[in-house]
Amino acid sequence: MAVGWAVFRNYVGHAKEIYGDITDYPRFFLMPPTALVESDEHGNNVVALSSAEDHIDHEVELVIRLGDDLEPVEMCVGNDTTNRTRQTLAKKKGWPWLEGKGFAGSGVLGTWSAWDPAPVEIGLSVNGEVRQQASTELMVHSVESILGHLKNWYEPSPGDLVWTGTPKGVGAMHEGDQVECWIKNSQGEIISNLSAECVI
């Protein structure tokens, strides 16, 4: 089964908003298969909030699927949801982040399109309000660098998903919120979309 390899703090703006530093090379956390939720062909999905009491953030990302040669074959938009309450506690205690970053349903995926290495725009809105919007040109570590480090240090498998980091603007989601995510190419065309309702 496919797993997710997720890069953290890969946009300067997001690192600043969470008071984190930029790493000198791509660093990853693992998303188990149960975290990854595919959309239907129209991009419909759900955001399964892990707790009604905890602070759950949205994080829009470019996601890449690896082919048999471990090179990119497809890409889509994803919402890497974060239980910030559990993650913050884990950081303070020195515990693993799994409760905050790898809970069931935390990696919400949109529609897939063929891989294109050209820069794209990723964006996210909640109830019609745009909260995140940025070009992948702003990534600190390029896709080439990400994949190089991933293959040198770990052993990814065909079909695995690589989450490339989120830009600034992360924010809380609540039950009933409608989350829309997209990837636009250089012509402004939407090539991947995600439409999801937040549920408990």
Image (cartoon, grey):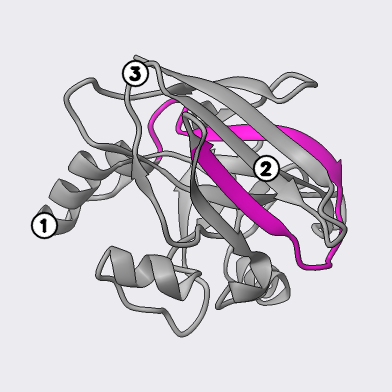
* Extent of the magenta region: 102-125
Residue 126 position, x and y percent, is 46, 34
Question: Which of the two residues, 58 or 176, is positioned nearer the viewer here?
Answer: 176
Describe the element under mark 2 as helix, strand or loop.
Answer: strand
Residue under label 3, please give it.
175
- Whether residue 151 is visible, yes or no, is no
Question: Marks 2 and 3: in contact by CB < 8 Å?
Answer: no
Callout 3 amino acid: Glu
Residue at image x 18%, y 57%?
91
Describe the element under mark 3 as helix, strand or loop.
Answer: loop
Residue 191 position, x and y percent, is 82, 43
Q: Is residue 92 left or right of residue 101?
A: left
Q: Which mark is residue 131?
A: none
Answer with the quarter of the image where residue 84 lies: top left
The mark that comes first in sequence, 1 or 3, is: 1
Residue under label 2, please give it.
182
Question: Which of the two residues, 1 or 163, is positioned nearer the viewer here?
Answer: 163
Which quadrant is home to the N terminus? Answer: top right
Residue at image x 87%, y 58%?
187
When the figure is inspected, residue 159 is found, relative to residue 106, above or below; the finding is below
The mark that comes first in sequence, 1 or 2, is: 1
Residue under label 1, please give it.
92
Residue at image x 29%, y 48%?
97
Question: Which of the two residues, 178 or 140, is positioned nearer the viewer here?
Answer: 178
User: Badge 3, how many Cα within 10 Å: few under 14, some, many 20+?
Assistant: some
